[in-house]
Image (tube, helix red, strand yellow):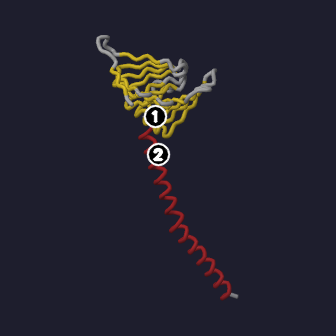
Amino acid sequence: MNRKSALQALMVFLIILISLLFYLKYFNKNSIDLIKNVEGEKVNININSSSNYIDEINYTSSDAKGNQYQITAEQAEIDIDNPDVMFLENVVAYVFLKDSDIVKITSDFGKYNSKNSDTIFSKNVIVIYTDHEITGEYLDYSFVNNIGTISIDVVYVGNKTILHADRVEMNITTKDTKIFMNDDTKKVLTVGTE
């Protein structure tokens, strides 16, 4: 029996030793790596705690008339002083007018107020609806009032007409449009196309 007990004790010792080596080789190393990763994540969180960036945002608003406004951006930064305001990059917005056309607005940058859906689009602004396209560098759009003012290097391309102006004011709902030059002595340049 002594020999049998010694053999059993040796087997138990070997199983414990193999288990311990297995644990130290695979689990303990992963635990140390996991602790290092967690510490690294803590550092990254602390580095980015002063900035409030959101990737791939999408907001939708609607009014009492049934019109909808949807705005998306690749990245947004929340204004620390005013959390309702976000600075956007690569912006695409749609105005879905009830029983009417869809208006698409794109720009490189934007400033969006989530409280009232007012948006300022800037740099490479393009407004497209039906057969009309307006380009410029700055668009101030109010969803509540459905009024937008586009300015700086404005070009309107419509049916057989191209207009160059300093500023275009448009009512998105009624499609009423006013075209201006900032200097009263200058005139809007109109070019006919066919």
Mark 2 or mark 1, which has the lower sequence index?
Answer: 2
* Residue displayed at 43% across by 35% down: 89
For the N terminus, the image quarter is: bottom right
Give the Cα separation between the discs numbered 2 and 1: 31 Å
Outermost residue, left direction?
A: 185
Above or below, 8 against 159 in this view is below
Q: Which residue is mark 2?
A: 42
Q: Residues within 10 Å of mark 1 (few under 14, many from 20)?
A: many
Viewer-nearest of labels 2 and 1?
A: 1
* Closer to us: 134 or 76: 134
Task: Return the x and y of residue 47 as percentages of the image width and height.
Answer: 41, 41
Identify which residue, 188 or 19, lies in the foreground. Answer: 188
Q: Which residue is mark 1?
A: 91
Point 52% across, 63% down: residue: 28
The answer to which quarter of the image holds residue 69 is top right
Q: Is residue 124 left or right of residue 176?
A: left
> Image quadrant for the C terminus?
top left
Residue 41, image x, y percentages = 47, 48
Please report contact status of discs 2 and 1: CB closer than 8 Å, yes or no: no
Element under label 2? helix
Bin the neighbour count of mark 2 within 10 Å (Cα to Cα): few under 14, some 14-19, many 20 and up: few
Quarter location, residue 126: top left
> Relative to 29, is 12 on the left or the right?
right
At label 1, the amino acid type is Val
Vertical placement of 80 versus 57: above or below? above
Q: Amino acid at mark 2?
A: Lys
Q: Residue furthest top?
A: 184
What residue is shown at x 46% (from left), y 34% (from top)?
A: 91
Q: Nearer the viewer, residue 131 or 94?
A: 131
